[in-house]
Amino acid sequence: MRTTIFGFFCALATIVTACNSKPSEFRNDFRWIAGKWQGTNGSVFMMEQWTWNKTRFEGRGFEIDQGDTLFSERLYLQSFDGAYAYIAYLPKHGLTLFNARKETETHWIFENQDHDFPAAIHYKLESDSTITVSLLAKGEPFRGEHSYQLKRIK
C-alpha cells in the first residue's frame, strides 16, 4: 500500500513540477548538489548521491556502522509553483516534506516544524568539494544539533 501511495505521490509531483514556469532557475539553484558525497561521524559512514532527473533532483542517503545499515532514505528536491521542497522518504516512516528557504547562494534551510527530528535541515556548500549538513530538533535542547561534513567523491 505504501509503495502505491508513494508511486502516486511521485507521479503527481512530477506532473505538478512539469508545470513550473522556471525549471531552469530551480535546477541552477541546486546544481551544486549533484554528485556523490561521503563522510564519517565517529564510526558511522554516511553517503548521499544526487542526480538531476528531468524536473527534480533525486537522492539516496545511507548511514552504515560497522557493516550494518542504520538507515537508508530516498531524497527529492522539487519545485512546486516556484516554492521549493525537500522530501525525505524512509521505508518505515513514509514521506516527510520540508519547505525550502534560501539563506545565501550556498546555504539552504529545509523546515518542517510539525516534525520533531529533524525539524530543520541545513545544507551549506563550504567549497566545490565539501558540504556541511546540520539536523536540528524542534524544541528539544537535549537532542540539539547533529552536524557532519560530506566530501564530493564524484
Image (spheres, rainbow, N blue to C red):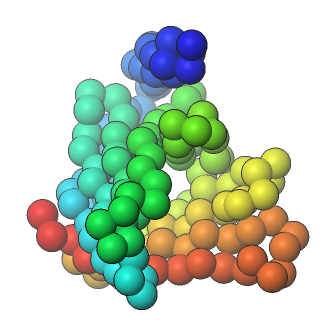
Q: Measured from the top left, where is residue 13 in percent x and y?
A: 50, 21
Residue at 62% x, 39% y is 93
Q: Measured from the top left, where is residue 97 in percent x and y?
A: 63, 40
Residue at 53% x, 63% y is 108
Residue at 68% x, 55% y is 111
Position of the N terminus by quadrant:
top right
In the shown orientation, is residue 100 left or right of residue 58?
Answer: right
Position of the C terminus by quadrant:
bottom left
In the shown orientation, is residue 152 left or right of residue 74?
Answer: left
Q: Tell me where residue 80 sits by quadrant.
A: top right
Q: Residue furthest bottom?
A: 42
Q: Is 18 situated above or below 118?
A: above
Residue at 51% x, 37% y is 91
Residue 12 visible in image? no
Q: Measured from the top left, where is residue 26 in percent x and y?
A: 40, 43
Q: Measured from the top left, where is residue 124 in percent x and y?
A: 45, 73
Q: Nearer the viewer, residue 28 or 78?
A: 78
Q: Residue furthest left?
A: 154
